[in-house]
Amino acid sequence: MERVAEPTGGQHAAPPAARAPGVRRGRRRGALAVMDNIGERYYEAELYRLKGELLLAQQGNGPLWFEAEGRFQHALAVARSQQAKSLELRAAMSLARLWQRQGQHAEAHALLAEVYGWFTEGFDTQDVREAKALLQELQRGRAQ
């Protein structure tokens, strides 16, 4: 798995979307254009979330944090308006990870706990398992 440097000197795995062929060459814009042309908006939240992840993979900190945070917030708002809980969970996890990197453990935990609390099934899915693990990690970070 490709590694991306973090501002603290550590590394984390690049999101799968950042490794997808053509994504780094800007083809994600094409996906948004197609979405606009055909009027299909189901994956709009996911596209904005992925744009935020790609921004972080490009530079990882500084000014791009603000732009990535805006993409994650937009993805969260779109998912909520569509009542797409799985996409909302993904957007919340991305935003929570960013806030975690910025030392905002309590805010990240509160956001993710709210979204995670909606789930009453699907606890064996990868996204829900990752959310639970991230919540536990954030809880430990809040205690420090």
Image (cartoon, rainbow, N blue to C red):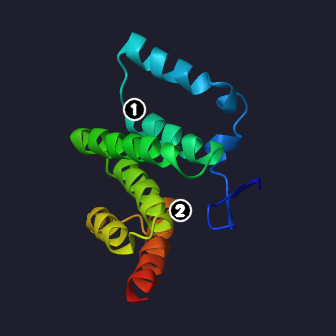
Which residue is farthest left?
81
- Which quarter of the image is occupied by the N terminus? bottom right
Please say if 87 is above or below 11.
Answer: above
Which residue is farthest front?
62
Q: Secondary structure at mark 1?
A: helix
Q: Nearer the viewer, mark 1 or mark 2?
A: 1
Measured from the top left, where is residue 16 in percent x and y?
65, 47
Residue that appears at 49% across and 62% down? 125
| 50 with respect to 111 (left or right) | right
Measured from the top left, where is residue 13 in percent x and y?
68, 59
The residue closer to the viewer here, 103 or 116, is 103
* Residue type, label 2: Gln
| 24 with respect to 2 (left or right) | left
Which residue is farthest bottom?
143
N-term-proximal mark, 1 vs 2: 1
Disc 1 crowd rating (10 Å Cα; few below 14, some 14-19, many 20+) is many
Residue 126, disc = 2
Residue that appears at 63% across and 47% down? 57
Q: Name the image quarter holding residue 8.
A: bottom right
- Which quarter of the image is occupied by the C terminus? bottom left
Residue that appears at 52% across and 41% down? 50
Q: Secondary structure at mark 2?
A: helix
Q: Which residue is mark 1?
A: 44
